[in-house]
Image (spheres, grey):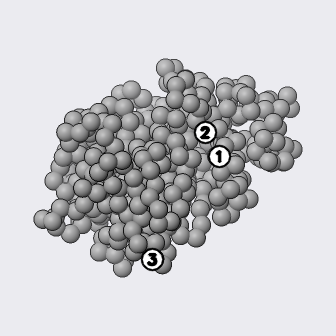
């Protein structure tokens, strides 16, 4: 049976599973006013896209690692059966599209309130074995990544679970024994980025019993009172999807499967596809520099995304930023090289200049912009810490370490600019 893809109940196309997997847009979608492509790799045409195009794009909607294995066990499908997994978990994904059929007996989309802090704490505790509550009646959601997380909605000021295809409004990320203080770390880095005038997803923190969590507002959702749920989805895709690459190629320096996207590749993509090229180029440059300054060594291609509308493609707000310094087991190597340099402390002015030249930017102006962002980061460290400490989950020991690490990195980057 074909697996449908829809936008707010409107048919977008179907994934054929008889014989070779392929995707074909529906005639109604191609004729619809405001129709957008599901990916820049799949423009709006009436010919099918083969498995080699649609399957990597779909794979990037699923979690990775243990979460993917657990999802497969829960639905009785192989972790390699991308279409089958998404037919069970794809009603609420990254972007605007819903994948899979609505059961004939399903009630309308709605939000199921989480009754108490104890209930939320239980849900969080079960996530490793039950990612995205897979298997719960009416619940169908999926997000990429290796970290435990849950898509939720804020309904009447309270956390609720979207059911029967209702759009989530926030992403909830619980604390982690593997990365102590990760909730406060990510809250700090995203708050710092926003204070430095970078476009970022809005965040706050919370607690459920003894568990802290990060609550990230989804930028691919917006209020719309004309919709039954009060929300509408906005389409997006990450850079792996936009470049036609599977998720295992998200890092530039992959040892197997071929290299992933470089900074130069992403700038070239912006030049070819973005609707506001100059503005998005500067935003991407600021993101690259900021990730170096906070030592976010996991800034791979899936942690940069694009907003796709029927008439434009724009760089999406930043998300998933965390300082790696407090965690000695995390690599000190950046996910993408600046010129040929992978260690943030070793990036010098000559590396920034050569990167700028390779990306079609003015080297001298690039150095000035790096220096200006160093000043802004240093000037907002205290304000970012204060902001996180006043969030519902309060402060944490790790904030002091992060402030010290970023301050030290800023000093190093500034001193290296003349080299």
Task: Kindly identify which residue carries mark 2.
Answer: 261
- Residue under circle 1? 266
Does residue 417 appear left or right of residue 191 in this picture?
Answer: right
Total marks shown come to 3
**Mark 3 crowdedness (10 Å alpha carbons): few <14, some 14-19, many ≥20:** few
Work out which residue is located at the far left of the displayed protein and give it.
105
Classify residue 167 by image quadrant: bottom left
Mark 3–mark 1 distance (CA, rounded to whole Å): 30 Å
Residue at the image point whose x is 66% and y is 54% from the top: 270
* Upstream in sequence: badge 2 or badge 1: 2
Give 107 or 368, whichever is nearer the viewer: 107
- Where residue 53 appears, x then y in whole percent? 48, 48
* Percent position of residue 1, x then y: 24, 55
In space, the residues marked 2 and 1 are separated at their CA atoms by 7 Å
Seen in the picture, residue 52 relative to 343 is either above or below; the reply is: below
Note whether residue 92 is visible: no
**Pointer 3 or 1: first along the chain:** 3
Query: In the rendering, at what x and y percent does residue 79 appear?
Result: 30, 36
The quarter holding residue 175 reads top left
Going 39% across and 68% down the picture, which residue do you hit? 26
Callouts 2 and 1 close, C-beta under 8 Å: yes
Q: Earlier in the sequence, mark 3 or mark 2?
A: 3
Label of residue 119 in the image:
none
Mark 2 residue element: loop
Residue 378 image offset from top left, x and y in percent: 68, 41
Q: Nearer the viewer, mark 3 or mark 1?
A: 3
Kindly identify which numbered label has been placed on residue 32. 3
Q: Judge the density around disc 1: few (<14), some (14-19), many (≥20) Cα neighbours within 10 Å.
A: many
Farthest top residue in view: 329
Callout 3: helix, strand or loop?
loop
Give the quadrant of the C terminus. Answer: top right
Label 3, label 2: how far apart the Cα atoms are? 33 Å
């Amino acid at each position: 049976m074909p697996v449908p893809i829809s936008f707010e109940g409107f048919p977008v196309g179907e994934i054929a599973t008889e014989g070779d997997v392929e995707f074909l847009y529906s005639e109604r979608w191609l004729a619809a006013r405001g129709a957008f492509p599901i990916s820049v790799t799949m423009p709006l045409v009436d010919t099918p896209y083969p498995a080699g195009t649609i399957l990597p794009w779909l794979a990037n909607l699923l979690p990775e690692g243990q979460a993917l294995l657990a999802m497969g066990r829960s639905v009785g499908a192989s972790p390699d059966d991308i279409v089958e997994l998404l037919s069970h978990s794809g009603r609420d994904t990254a972007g605007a599209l819903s994948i899979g059929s609505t059961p004939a007996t399903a009630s309308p989309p709605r939000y199921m309130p989480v009754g108490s802090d104890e209930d939320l704490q239980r849900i969080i505790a079960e996530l490793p074995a039950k990612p995205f509550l897979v298997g719960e009646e009416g619940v169908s959601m999926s997000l990429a990544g290796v970290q435990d997380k849950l898509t939720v909605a804020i309904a009447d000021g309270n956390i609720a679970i979207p059911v029967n295809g209702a759009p989530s409004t926030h992403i909830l990320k619980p604390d982690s024994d593997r990365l102590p203080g990760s909730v406060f770390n990510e809250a700090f880095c995203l708050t710092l980025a926003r204070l430095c005038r970078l476009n970022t997803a809005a965040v706050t923190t919370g607690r459920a019993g003894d568990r802290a969590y990060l609550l990230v507002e989804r930028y691919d959702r917006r209020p719309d009172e004309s919709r039954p749920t009060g929300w509408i989805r906005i389409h997006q895709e990450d850079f792996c999807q936009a470049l036609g690459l599977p998720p295992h190629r998200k890092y530039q320096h992959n040892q197997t499967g071929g290299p992933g996207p470089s900074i130069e590749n992403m700038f070239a993509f912006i030049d070819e596809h973005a609707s506001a090229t100059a503005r998005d180029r500067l935003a991407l440059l600021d993101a690259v520099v900021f990730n170096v300054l906070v030592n976010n060594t996991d800034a791979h291609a899936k942690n940069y995304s694009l907003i796709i509308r029927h008439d434009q493609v724009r760089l999406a707000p930043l998300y998933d930023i965390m300082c790696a310094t407090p965690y000695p087991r995390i690599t000190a190597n950046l996910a993408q090289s600046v010129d040929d340099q992978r260690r943030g402390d070793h990036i010098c002015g000559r590396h920034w200049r050569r990167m700028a030249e390779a990306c079609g930017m003015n080297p001298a102006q690039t150095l000035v912009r790096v220096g200006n962002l160093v000043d802004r980061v240093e000037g907002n460290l205290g304000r970012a810490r204060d902001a996180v400490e006043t969030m519902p989950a309060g402060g944490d020991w790790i904030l002091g370490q992060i402030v010290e690490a970023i301050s030290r990195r800023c000093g190093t980057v500034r001193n290296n600019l003349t080299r």
